[in-house]
Image: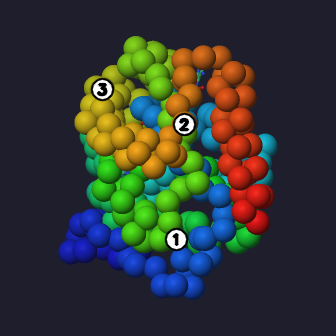
């Protein structure tokens, strides 16, 4: 992945026609929502059920941040601990590189992407197509904070500290509205109430994915 003068790239690498063609047929489901809204938990279950690949962008970035040899690792870690966003070019390259490395994927649940309208537009520019559907988890701020504070006791995530949680929420609220409008206008947005018990949320997500699969097989 290219690094620009000690910084992370803002602009993604273009993909040639052959690479774009590889990303034409898999089903692509974007799963978005605030921090703690349940994206990760449900994408993991959905990926198992549908035999799709679960691509958690935050997780991919945490792996990059751990690479001692990578000059970008410290920059990524610092950004994540500020609850801010990693530059869009770097995220797009990471996303497309990972998708292209996944041989014969039937589909992808892309968890935590896009964050901001620029990422939504860049995806279409680079990949040459929109996602098949976008699931958004609607969740109250109080619930999201409570869940993340609860998870903070496990020590699994360095960014689960109240100050950083609030910054992650602020980043989310600042950037998410135009993304929702964008996909609503394209009739690609499906809202799921993330406050409900996990079984109900899972069933609602499955019904969204089943509809996409039905439409996909009709096209085939
Ligand atoms: P990321 O790792 O994606 O974190 P996040 O968006 O802050 O979300 P979380 O993973 O904390 O929550 P979640 O919605 O997945 O909920 P979960 O299922 O885990 O991103 C981290 C950072 O990476 C970002 O801040 C940014 O810096 C960077 N980044 C990521 N994507 C980027 C992008 N596209 N561009 C630029 N930078 C990017 O659930 C949370 C907890 O709640 C769990 O304990 C779970 O068990 C519980 N829970 C979930 N649902 C329920 C339920 N229904 N009932 C009860 N408990 C529940």
Q: Earlier in the sequence, mark 3 or mark 1?
A: 1
Nearer the observer, 142 or 74: 142
Query: Which residue is labeled 1 in the image?
Result: 97
**Label 1 environment density (alpha carbons within 10 Å; few <14, some 14–19, many ≥20):** few
Going 71% across and 52% down the picture, which residue do you hit? 215
**Residue 126 can be seen, yes or no:** yes
Q: In the rendering, at what x and y percent does residue 190 appear? A: 54, 36
Nearer the observer, 141 or 150: 141
Q: Secondary structure at mark 2?
A: strand
Query: Which residue is labeled 3 in the image?
Result: 166
Answer yes or no: do the residues labelled 3 and 1 have beta carbons within 8 Å?
Answer: no
Would you say 32 lies left or right of 211 here? Answer: left
Query: Which residue is labeled 2 in the image?
Result: 190
Q: Secondary structure at mark 3?
A: helix
Q: Secondary structure at mark 1?
A: helix
Q: In the rendering, at what x and y percent does residue 139 appear? A: 46, 22
């Amino acid at each position: 992945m290219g690094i620009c003068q000690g910084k992370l790239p803002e602009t993604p690498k273009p993909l040639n026609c052959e690479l774009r063609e590889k990303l034409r047929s898999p089903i692509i489901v974007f799963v978005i929502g605030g921090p703690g809204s349940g994206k990760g938990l449900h994408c993991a279950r959905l990926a198992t059920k549908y035999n799709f690949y679960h691509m958690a962008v935050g997780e991919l970035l945490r792996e990059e941040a751990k690479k001692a040899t990578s000059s970008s690792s410290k920059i990524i870690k610092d950004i994540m601990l500020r609850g801010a966003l990693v530059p869009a070019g770097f995220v797009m390259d990471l996303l497309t590189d990972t998708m292209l490395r996944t041989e014969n994927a039937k589909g992808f649940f892309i968890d935590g992407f896009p964050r901001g309208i620029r990422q939504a537009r860049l995806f279409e520019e680079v990949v040459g197509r929109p996602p098949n559907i976008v699931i958004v988890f609607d969740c109250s701020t109080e619930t999201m904070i409570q869940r993340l504070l609860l998870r903070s006791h496990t020590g699994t995530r360095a960014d689960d500290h109240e100050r950083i949680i609030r910054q992650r929420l602020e980043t989310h609220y600042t950037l998410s509205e135009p993304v929702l409008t964008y996909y609503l206008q394209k009739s690609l947005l499906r809202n799921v109430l993330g406050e409900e018990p996990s079984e109900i949320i899972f069933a609602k997500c499955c019904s969204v994915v089943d509809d996409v699969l039905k439409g996909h097989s009709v096209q085939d």
